[in-house]
Amino acid sequence: MSRTQKLLIPLIALMLLLIGAIVYQVIAGNGEADRSRLLSAGIVLLPQSRELPSLEMTDQDGEPLALDGLTDKWSLLFFGYTYCPDICPTTLAELRQLDEQLAPEVKERLRVVLVTVDPERDTPQQLKQYLAYFNPTFIGLNGDMEQIKTLASRVSIPFIPPDTSKPGYTVDHSGNLAVIGPDGRQRGFIRSPLDVKALAEQLPNLMAE
C-alpha cells in the first residue's frame, strides 16, 4: 500500500465523521441557527464530546505537560512539524492573524497547541524557536511516536509517520484543528483552510458556552 493510500484511509474516515457531525448539526433542533453560523466558519461540533488519552508529553520549554492539564481554557490542537514546507507555516500564520483579531478577554481563554508529527527533529528548543516566529504564546508538544499516534487517532486528525531514514523527509498530515473545551474534552474540529475572519467572529460564541 502506497503512502498516499495509507493517508487516504484515515482521511476518508475523518471525512465521514465530519459529514456525520455536519448532518447532526443541521438536523438538531436546539441552537440550529448558532450551529449553522459555526459551521459556516468551518467549526464542526461533535455529537458527543471525547475524552483525551491520558498521556504526558514535553512542551517547548522541556517541561512535562499532561494532556489532562489542557483545562480551564479552550485549546486548538494542530498536528504539524517545524520542517513542513507549506501547510504548517500557512496555518500558524493564520492562527497568528486570528489571535490578533480576537478581543483580549477571548485570547486569555484560548491556547494554540502544535503537536509535532516529527518528534525526531522537533526538539523542545526547535519547537520554541519556530513557534516564537508566529506567536510566543503558542505551545509546542513533543513525545514519542506512539504517544503522538495515540493522540492523533483519538481526535481523528490523521498523519503518516515519516520514513526518517530518508534525508529531507516530509510528513503527510492534515491541516484540520481539534477543538478542546475547557473541560479537557474534544468538542469538534475546525476545517482547513482556515477562514480567519469568520473564526474571529464565531469562536467567541462557541467559547461563551
Image (cartoon, rainbow, N blue to C red):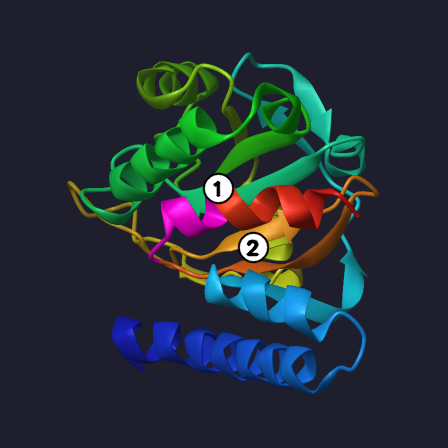
Viewer can see residue 92:
yes
| Residue 68 percent across, percent down from the top left | 80, 37
Rendered image quadrant of residue 141: top right
| Residue 63 percent across, percent down from the top left | 64, 15
Residue 194 in the magenta stretch? The answer is yes
User: Which of 82 and 18 lies nearest the eye of the viewer?
Assistant: 18
Q: Which residue is mark 2?
A: 149
Judge from the rendering whether residue 195 lies leftward or rightward of residue 187; answer left or right.
left
Judge from the rendering whether residue 52 lies leftward or rightward of residue 198; answer left or right.
right
- Which residues make up the magenta segment? 193-200
Q: Which residue is mark 1?
A: 200
| Residue 161 percent across, percent down from the top left | 40, 55
Question: What amino acid does circle 2 point to?
Answer: Lys
On screen, residue 132 above or below 205: above
Q: Residue at x 37, y 52 (%)?
A: 194
Q: Nearer the viewer, mark 1 or mark 2?
A: 1
Q: Residue at x 47, y 62 (%)?
A: 42
On screen, residue 209 above or below 97: below
